[in-house]
Amino acid sequence: KITLMLRSSLFVNILNNNNKLFGKYKYCNKKINKCFNVAVIGSGPAGFYTADSLIKEDIKSQDFSLNFNIDIFDKCPVPFGLVRFGVAPDHPEVKNVINKWNELLLSKENETNKIRFFGNVNVIGNKTEIKEENYYDKVKMDQIEEKSYSNILFKNGKSGLLSKYTTNVLLEKLNELYDIIIFCNGCEDENKLNIEGEESLNGIYSARDFVNWYNGSLPYNHFYQQKENPFDLQTARNMSVVGNGNVALDIVRILIKSKLTDSLESTDITSSSLEQLKKSKNLKNIHLIGRRGIIQSSFTNKELRELLNLQKEGICEIFVNSHDIQLNNSSAIEMKDKRINKRKYDIIKKNATIIDFEDFIDDQQCFNFNHNKTNDKINLYFHFNISPIEFKGDSNSPSENHVQSIHLQQNQLKGEPFNQFVVPLNNDPSALLRLDSDLVIKSIGYKGFNISGIPFNEKRGIIINDKGKIDITNININTKKKNSHNASYYTAGWIKRGPDGIIGTNLFDAKETVFSIFDDIEGNILIPKSSSSNNNIITLNNEDFLPSHNDNKPIIITSDKWNKIDLHEMSLNEHKPREKIIYFSDITKIIE
């Protein structure tokens, strides 16, 4: 892992940034005696790594004193974002970082918290973003039928995933109170295939829906737990996962593991979701669909080996097309030049069953995998160099409007090594292949939502920034006070660079942003609103927040209230690290 990080351009850029990595910031010959109030928007890895990096640079000496008081805001009632709701439940080692972040929230210095948490608080650019149809517990269930919940939540814009109990705060209020505002709010939207049937057919879901559901995200459980057959798990026989990244493999692995006794029971997967996963008894075939080749696939070798371990346990069998084992010249060079690519190729070639998929295409250009029909194993097919072109429903039952098959286009890679692009192998429509699928999960990446007034790259789905710094001249925030001192704005994590890397990548990304902050402090560009160098902690009052959509008193989950929730979750099941609370009504009872 260290070798991979050393090779990353982000690490190299930070390493070259005045040699400040992992050390105290060098302040030349300047005396600095300042205290900054910081608002971090988002409590995922980027938010906590950024807060922790600032605290570690909290300097006191004879020559200068530099203090940071950090408030972390999140529209979710509970903290930790991607680590809590994105990391697979059977990867507890990745979640261990939560223990350290909990210590940051609950540790005290001079009887005051250096880092405070304010959950259930949604930061908005203007009041027009508050719309009734964007509140998940105000959506009428009988109008949704079986479509992907996220399609309902996000069709009206970026304010989805809110509860009627969510408290809103205007960015202009934070601008008025804080010296530094750092956006670490991640990527909540998803990429689209933009093909026919994607939005109109039932049975097509996003990976975000599925992962958030089994990981206990409140909005998704509010919806899917009310379904008798969530994600069509009880009826699906042929499932396709579109995408070749770690999330795609996580979904497949969790589904297969749910069929093993006591395999997931000791994890933090929600018990209600595991119960539903175990009902997927009809599931026989899983197809992983990737538009590029083996060498270009983005899943890690670790994730691949975990699937192979399940094959060794006899619960599944993995198949790969013999044509995909044959590499073009550029891919062969990519494999030779990167050891990790060579390992991936060798792992697949050595452990998967290699068959010619063309042998299973019938006269109607439809895949008909007729082997292993009699055993209980799940057949897992890796399809490389192939892209979905259209989702088709059941023509005999159009009223059900449910996906039945995928039309696929075979691809080929062109171009120089490490710069190849995908082109169709054959543009003739008659060459399209059909794959039966009555359950489809799309895992093709995420993108961010903008907050009104903040410069945003719509194409990439990220905030426009330079090493984490946002140009304040491009920020359009209303201020109530004339000649008011505006905050300085920064960003870190996925919303800064895009959704790539592992959890630890956000540490180096956060360091880069923190270096930009210190550059501005040293250059006297960043000046605190208060001249005091003491811990001048902000007091937030109810009037600083907008009323909830339920017109109730703001419900704000502070650090001490989160501690109650945390202890309660860990006490519910002695055989699990925690049983996550999945309903807001239960949270309100715990914090009373």
Image (tube, rainbow, N blue to C red):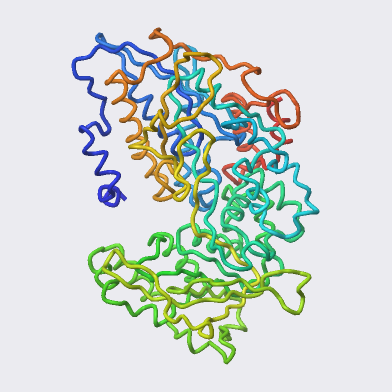
The one of 84 and 376 positioned closer to us in this rendering: 84
x and y percentages locating residue 126 in the rendered image: 60, 30
Please, which residue is most extreme toward the right here? 142
In the displayed structure, 119 sits above or below 173; it is below
* Residue drawn at (60%, 80%) of the image: 375
Please, which residue is most extreme toward the left here? 29
Please, which residue is most extreme toward the bottom here? 363
- Residue 264 in the figure: left or right of residue 58: right
The one of 544 and 583 positioned closer to us in this rendering: 544
The one of 399 and 570 positioned closer to us in this rendering: 399
* Residue drawn at (24%, 70%) of the image: 333
Q: Quadrant of residue 59?
A: top left
- Total marks shown come to 0
Which quadrant is home to the C terminus?
A: top right
* Residue drawn at (30%, 71%) of the image: 331
x and y percentages locating residue 133 in the rendered image: 72, 43
In the displayed structure, 355 sits above or below 116; it is below
x and y percentages locating residue 424 in the rendered image: 43, 76
In the displayed structure, 76 sits above or below 444; it is above
x and y percentages locating residue 64 in the rendered image: 28, 11
